Image: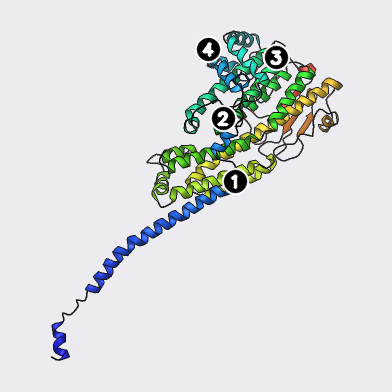
Amino acid sequence: MSEADLATLVPAKKPGSRRRWLVVAGLVALPLLLAVIYFYVGHLADVEFQDALAEADRLDPGWRLDDLLGRRPVYADGDNPALQVLRAKALLPKGWGAEKEFNDMFNDVYAFQPRSHQLDPDQQKVLREEMAKATAALAEAHKLADMPHGHFPSECSPQDWMSSRIIVTYSQDARYVVYLLQSATLQQAQEGDMKGALRSTQAIVNIGWSVGDEPPPNLALTHFYCRGFAARCLQRVLSQGEPSPAALADLQRLLEEEEAVNLLLCYMRGKRAWLDHRIVNVQNGNAKVADLLNSVDLSVGIRDPEAVEVALMTYSAGGLKSQCAAVLRYMTQFVESAKLAPEEQVQRNKQLEAEAGNHGLLVRALVPREIRTAESNQRSVALLRCAIAALAVERYRRAHNSWPAVLDALVAEGLLKRAPTDPYDGAALRYRNHDDRVVIYSIAMDMEDNGGTYPGKAGWTKGTDICFTLWNVAQRRMLPLPAAEPLEP
């Protein structure tokens, strides 16, 4: 048989068979390729996440939640201001001080623009009646003046202990007691009990320490709150009389100890540990992605523009882990920024804020809150430093019957260890001597010296400073303003 005959016996290949084989091979290879890409992208995200953890370990060893909790000191129940806050709050009548009419009567007394006028007869009457309802609670609250250190009491598991319900409840209880002591300070200063008024102010400072340097970030915000109220109460007390030099010195020492604590560092460490704790729970299936979104103050509904990005982050290969890595890296940068001197933090935090737009949704949602917290800390440090300098200035006046010409004179007198600096620019706090008063002030957020200009009711804005006023003795305890004359200029 010839080759030609054999060829006729072998069926010829159809033209499309090779193409079909290529299609089949492609259909098999494409899923494999996609799987390889998926796992490779996930591997890269895992490496990125491990690098973020390693960076935190290298720069700030012992930063995880269990480490922070393990370093908490132990306090006896009788010495722990946190438990004392709970005792005082339990004795407050339900709804005490919550009436709008009561609050409205005293809005201007603690206004940013200070006055040295006494309360008018109606204010005195209402204040006495309201304070009479809280006698037992106030007796317990005053004990806080002798309790400078403590921490948030809880025997819960870390999961429950970090729950917002527990944190919010305790923070709110602490603020109720602060408000009680603020009202007590107002009454004591009006009645000429300067020693008692300073002890009430001291108790407010110690309520800040009832939350210590705890990891939950909301507790640190309560600490900021106590600093601000203590400074405002002190300014009111010093506008109504002349406390003894010994009482002034005692409160100054307490405020110096308070100012030496880097509260922002405590907050940023706690926030990072809290986020890490949430991330681990999400990865282990013990929490939902929504819990993590809430941790960075992001609530996304199905119609929100961010919903698509959340879906991609949640279901794409390594999307969630990559964004979690970015969040941890960013929080580590905030921690490192908090270790700097306050005046150095301003520029660094501006840089972190500017760079946030280049990152994923979690970082973009996280950063604004942390920037606001850093700004709150900056204000609290400025207020504390102004208050400390004011106490030293008042002690100088008591010794010399005149105001110091410059704040450096306080160091020479041994009333301050060092000249106080402005946490915004690192220069010396500003000091101005007017005919009726002296003002110690910080240039505040606009980074401009506005001559000691007080904010209005809206709070600190451009063109205003963070100030503390001390009145000449002749201008203290001025007669009450007529009811028709507004306190706000």
> Which quarter of the image is occupied by the N terminus?
bottom left
Per the rendering, the mark at residue 196 is 3
Per the rendering, the mark at residue 219 is 2
Q: Residues within 10 Å of mark 1 (few under 14, many from 20)?
A: some
At label 3, the amino acid type is: Gly
At label 2, the amino acid type is: Leu
Q: Residue at x 30, y 63 (%)?
A: 28
Q: Residues within 10 Å of mark 2 (few under 14, many from 20)?
A: many
Q: CA distance from mark 4 to mark 3?
A: 23 Å
Looking at the image, residue 225 sits to the left or right of residue 394; the answer is: left
Badge 4 element: loop
Badge 3 element: helix
Q: Residues within 10 Å of mark 3 (few under 14, many from 20)?
A: some
Residue wearing tag 1: 333
| Quarter-of-image position of residue 41 | bottom left
In terms of sequence position, does the residue under pointer 2 or pointer 4 come before the other?
4
| Quarter-of-image position of residue 147 | top right
At label 4, the amino acid type is: Pro
Residue wearing tag 4: 93
